[in-house]
Amino acid sequence: MITEVRLRPLRNADFDRVLELERLLFGRGAWTYGMLADELAGLGRWYIVAEPERLDRAGDQPVVGYAGLWFDGDVTQVMTIGVDPAVQRHGVGRQLLTALIERSRKVKAEAVLLEVRVDNMPAIEMYRDFGFEILGVRKRYYQPEDKDAYTMRLDLAAPADDTADAPVDAPVDAPGDAA
C-alpha cells in the first residue's frame, strides 16, 4: 500500500506508463501516444505525475498517477487525472488535484473547469470536497462510450477551502525534457 507519493513534472520517459494507465482506466476512450504528445505540445499545458515515496529504493519509481492542466489566460481546465486502480482511495488523486489548483492560483486563473463522467461518483465526490460545483451536463461527451459528463467549476476568487488536503510540494515548471 502507498501512503505517500512525490509529485514531479511528466517526462518523455513516463509516456509508456501513462499510456498503460490510460488504457487501464479509460478503455476505448484512452489517449494514444500521438494524442498525448499533441496535448503536451499545446500552449499553456502543465502535466505532473505521482510516484511512490520509497525509502528502500533509489531513483524514480513506477508512476501511479498523472494529471494535466491547460491555462487559456483566464481559466484553467483540468485535462485529465488518472490514478492506478491499485492505489485509488489512498489520497493520490487528492494530491494531484491539489497541485493543479495550486498551479491555477499561481497563474492567476479566475476558475478551474473540468468534465467528469456522470457515473464516476468517487471523482464527483472528491471534486465537491474541493468546492467544485456542477454547471451542467454535456450529453454524450465521452466517446466512444457515449457517456454524459458533468461540467464542474471551482471559483478561485472564493477563499481557499481548508477542508481539502494540505498543499503539497508540487513542481512549478516542467523541465527541459518534458514533451
Image (cartoon, helix red, strand yellow):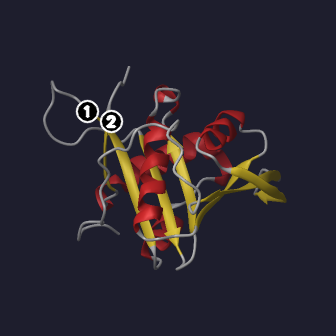
Q: Earlier in the sequence, mark 2 or mark 1?
A: 2
Badge 2 marks a residue whose secondary structure is: strand
Residue at 66 percent across and 53 percent down: it is 29
From the top left corner, tell me how far across and down residue 113 is, in percent. Answer: 64, 61
Q: CA distance from mark 2 to mark 1?
A: 5 Å
- Mark 2: few/some/many CA within 10 Å (<14, 14-19, 20+): many
User: On screen, 30 above or below 21?
Assistant: below
Q: Amino acid at mark 2?
A: Val
User: On screen, 98 above or below 39?
Assistant: above
Q: Give the quarter of the image for residue 125.
A: top right
From the top left corner, tell me how far across and down residue 93 is, in percent. Answer: 49, 39
Q: Amino acid at mark 1?
A: Glu
Nearer the observer, 129 or 27: 129
Nearer the observer, 121 or 106: 106
Nearer the observer, 134 or 19: 134
Q: Quadrant of the N terminus?
A: top left
Disc 2 target residue: 5
Q: Residue furthest top?
A: 1
User: On screen, 120 above or below 31?
Assistant: above
Residue at 34 percent across and 57 percent down: it is 10
Res 53 label: 1
Badge 1 marks a residue whose secondary structure is: loop
From the top left corner, tell me how far across and down residue 70 is, in percent. Answer: 51, 69
Left or right of 60? Residue 97 is right
